[in-house]
C-alpha cells in the first residue's frame, strides 16, 4: 500500500490530495463566492489521516471563513478577508472594498517525494477592478506516518504593483482592541469550541490571544466519533515579524491564525515584495506538549522547490 499522497486535479476548480483512500484536503483555487466574502482560494475540507474533518466552510456567524485560507482584512483601504471592514471611530461598516485573489496559473503541479506540490500565480484585485498585488504562492504537503500526521507547507510572496505604498494592518491597528486578525487563518469545526490551545509557554484558551510564539496548536473533539484531533501551526523563522502574534480563539469558536500585522502596520513600497512562510500539521489524536515540540523541530520544508 502506498505511503505517499495521490494528486487529483479538477481542472479550473480544485486540487485534491488523497492518502490511502482519505481525502486529506481539497484546495479550491477558483471559488464561486459572493464578492462580499472576498473570493480567494481556500483549503476545505481538511481531514486527518484517520478521516476526521478539521475545517468548516461558510459558518453562519462568519460566512467569509473558509477552512484554511490566506486572508487579510486591511490591505490599504481594501479588504481581502471578507465581510465588513472595521473603520476607526465608526466600527464595522459594509463597504464596497471586498477584493478578490484571482488564480491566474500554476507554474507547476506535481507529485514530489511521496507528497504533492504546486506553485501558483495570483492577482489581488480590488472590488473596483484594480490590480494591486501579484502573488507567488508555493504549497506542498507530505505525510508523517509515524507521527499520525500530515504537513501542509505554505509560502507566499506578495509583490506590490499598485503604484503606491500599501500599509498592511488589522482591525486592531484601526482601533479595535485585541482583534489583530489577518494572515494564514484556520477555522475549526463547531465541536472544537472550548478546545485546548497550546503554545511553548503553556496551555489555555482565549487568554493566549495576541501572544508571540513560534507555534501554536489547538486540540478539539469530534462529534459522532468522540475522537480528538490537533492542528499545529508554526511560523517560518525567516518571517520579518518572527515570532509573530497569534490570533487564537477557543470559547466563541475554534480558530488559529498567523497575525503578522496584529498590532503594527507594515508598509510595502511599490515594486517591493514581502514573503511569509508557515507550516500546518494536522494530527490524529490529542497531541501532548512533547509530541508538539518534536513536530516543531522538524526541518523546515519550503512550499516547493520552484524559485
Image: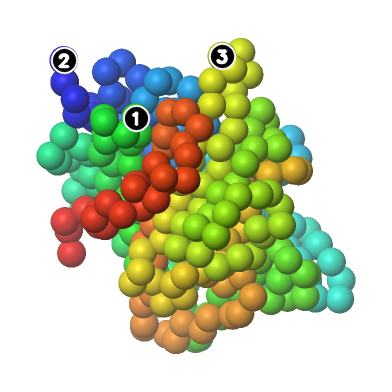
Q: Is residue 68 above or below residue 98?
A: above
Mark 2 burial class by Cα count in 10 Å: few <14, some 14-19, many 20+: few
Q: Image check: 58 left or right of 152? A: right
Mark 3 burial class by Cα count in 10 Å: few <14, some 14-19, many 20+: few
**Quadrant placement of the C terminus:** bottom left
Q: Image check: 116 left or right of 151? A: left
Q: Is residue 268 above or below residue 39?
A: below
Q: Spatial distance from mark 3 to mark 2, Cα to Cα? A: 26 Å
Element under disc 1 = loop
**Of label 3 and label 2, which has the lower sequence position?**
2
Residue picked out by circle 3: 225
How far across and how far down the image is residue 110, in percent? 17, 40
Mark 1 burial class by Cα count in 10 Å: few <14, some 14-19, many 20+: some
Q: Image check: 156 left or right of 181? A: left
Q: Spatial distance from mark 2 to mark 1, Cα to Cα? A: 16 Å
- What colour scheme does the image use? rainbow
Element under disc 2 = loop
Residue picked out by circle 2: 1
**Of label 2 and label 1, which has the lower sequence position?**
2
Residue picked out by circle 1: 148
How far across and how far down the image is residue 107, in percent? 21, 53
CB contact under 8 Å: marks 3 and 1: no
How far across and how far down the image is residue 82, in percent? 64, 53
- Residue 139 visible to an observer of this rendering: no
Question: Residue shown at 59%/23% (left/top)?
Answer: 222
Amino acid at each position: 500500500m502506498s505511503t505517499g499522497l495521490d494528486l487529483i486535479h479538477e481542472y479550473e476548480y480544485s486540487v485534491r490530495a488523497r492518502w490511502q483512500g482519505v481525502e486529506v484536503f481539497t484546495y479550491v483555487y477558483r471559488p464561486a463566492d459572493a464578492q462580499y466574502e472576498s473570493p480567494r482560494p481556500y483549503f476545505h475540507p481538511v481531514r486527518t489521516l484517520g478521516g476526521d474533518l478539521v475545517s468548516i466552510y461558510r459558518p453562519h456567524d462568519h460566512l467569509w471563513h473558509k477552512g484554511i485560507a490566506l486572508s487579510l482584512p486591511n490591505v490599504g483601504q481594501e479588504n481581502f478577508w471578507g465581510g465588513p471592514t472595521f473603520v476607526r471611530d465608526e466600527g464595522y461598516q459594509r463597504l464596497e472594498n471586498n477584493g478578490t485573489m484571482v488564480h491566474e496559473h500554476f507554474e507547476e503541479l506535481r507529485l514530489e517525494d511521496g507528497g504533492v506540490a504546486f506553485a501558483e500565480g495570483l492577482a489581488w484585485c480590488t472590488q473596483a477592478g484594480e490590480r494591486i498585488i501579484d502573488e507567488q504562492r508555493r504549497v506542498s504537503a507530505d505525510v508523517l506516518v509515524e507521527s499520525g500526521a500530515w504537513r501542509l507547507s505554505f509560502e507566499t510572496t506578495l509583490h506590490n504593483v499598485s503604484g503606491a505604498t500599501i500599509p498592511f494592518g488589522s482591525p486592531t491597528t484601526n482601533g479595535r482592541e485585541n482583534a489583530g486578525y489577518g494572515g494564514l487563518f484556520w477555522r475549526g469545526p463547531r465541536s472544537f469550541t472550548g478546545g485546548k490551545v497550546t503554545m511553548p509557554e503553556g496551555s489555555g484558551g482565549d487568554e493566549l490571544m495576541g501572544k508571540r510564539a513560534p507555534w501554536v496548536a489547538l486540540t478539539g473533539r469530534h462529534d459522532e466519533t468522540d475522537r480528538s484531533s490537533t492542528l499545529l501551526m508554526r511560523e517560518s523563522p525567516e518571517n520579518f515579524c518572527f515570532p509573530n502574534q497569534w490570533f487564537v480563539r477557543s470559547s466563541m469558536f475554534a480558530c488559529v491564525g498567523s497575525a503578522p500585522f496584529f498590532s503594527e502596520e507594515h508598509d510595502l513600497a511599490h515594486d517591493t515584495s514581502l514573503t511569509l512562510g508557515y507550516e500546518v500539521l494536522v494530527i490524529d489524536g490529542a497531541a501532548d506538549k512533547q509530541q508538539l515540540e518534536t513536530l516543531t523541530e522538524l526541518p523546515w520544508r519550503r512550499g516547493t522547490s520552484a524559485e
